[in-house]
Image (cartoon, helix red, strand yellow):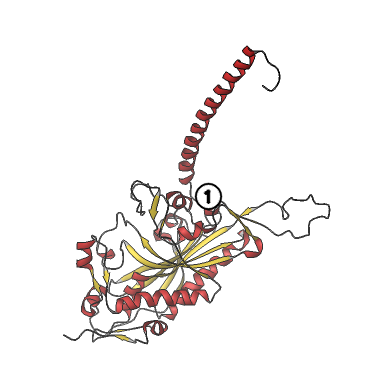
Amino acid sequence: MKGKLDPSVRQALVEEGKNLKEALIGLEEDLVELTDKLQLEAQSIPNATHPDVPVGSEESSVVRKEVGSQRSFNFTIKDHLQLGKELDLFDFDAAAEVSGSKFYYLKNEAVLLDMALINWAISEVSKKGFTPLITPEIVRSSVVEKCGFQPRAQNTQVYSIENSDQCLIGTAEIPVGGIHMDSILLDSALPLKYVAYSHCFRTEAGAAGAATRGLYRVHQFSKVEMFIFCRPEESDKWHEELITIEEDLYASLGLHFKTLDMATGDLGAPAYRKFDIEAWMPGLERYGEISSASNCTDYQSRRLGIRYRPTPSEPPPTDAKKGKAAGGPTQFVHTLNATAVAVPRLIVCILENFQQDDGSIVIPEPLRPFMGGLEVLSPKSK
């Protein structure tokens, strides 16, 4: 086009250029559509599983550890709903009118207990080198998907915001997972350990029955979540560290619980291996899940684009080309997440396990400094 051309030749080239541009627009539109289809297909593929994970449905899960024993009561025990009513701690009826079923108001000392659990958990986990965070509670749908959740799927647990590309979070795992999205981390900075407080929102689609009554399964709750970005060869070690932190937290509260190595059928898409902790809830007359710890290997980091560049074992040669990144190719980090405190379920445990025959509740000792020294919740005088 720059040279001297016959006008007819020049015009033919101009037309060809226009045609190429229009064809390119069409190809780019096709590429976006195909990329979306590929993403949907890829989302249906779960992570690989650790060779030691039990194969089968949830019932095939194996108990790794058991701490404490079921408390024996010499009086008729009550569940947390009855205890909460007598102690004036909850109001489910007013919340049902205002918001719908599976919502609640916390009242009086239950508010102190909620905040004590949060502050105690953050305080204890921070001592282990975790950086405290308070996260956004509305995130882009694409980030939810990249973390391995499906906000638009049937029976999804995710609340999507209409006419937007945003969702309410079901766990702080999602915004913390996204904090280093599309970045290359320094090898020297790993592991990055966070302890994050947030509210969580879940549709609880398909959940019903007496086993889910009261605070056990609700649409909104407070939670403290641990999250680690680490080198691939260290993720198994950090998984053990996370479950140990959880076990130490719950043992210090005096709870009876068991730790399970969850079977393949209960892992969910992102988890390579998952340990659950189930605590005894005497009022509900069963064990209930209070936390889990998952090693997601590079399942989330591949989708989120989180890499690191390993430090070379030997210094680069002196004649290395200037400007070329030292340290070789980047690798995807591994991500892990674990619950420090899911507040409503721990309130259930505390009320039901530490109830007394006069209707009072003994507050576990580690929580007392976070409740202004309060040791016992006593029934209100009529």
- Tell me: 275 left or right of 347: right
Question: Residue 46: x percent and y percent?
Answer: 48, 50
Residue 131, image x and y in percent?
A: 53, 70
Q: Quadrant of residue 87?
A: bottom left
Which quadrant of the structure image shows residue 314?
A: bottom right
Answer above or below: position of 122 versus 50: below
Q: Which residue is mark 1?
A: 303
In the picture shown, does residue 316 fall above or below 30? below
Q: Secondary structure at mark 1?
A: helix
Residue 48 in sight here: no
Residues 282 and 15: in front is 15
Residue occupying the point 33% across, 50% down = 155
> From this viewpoint, which residue is outermost toward the left?
382
Place of residue 156 in the rendered image (x, y in percent of width and height, measured from the top left):
35, 51
Give above or below for 171 relative to 10: below
Amino acid type indicated by mark 1: Arg
Q: Which quarter of the figure has residue 139? A: bottom left
Q: Position of residue 159 (x, y in %)?
A: 34, 53
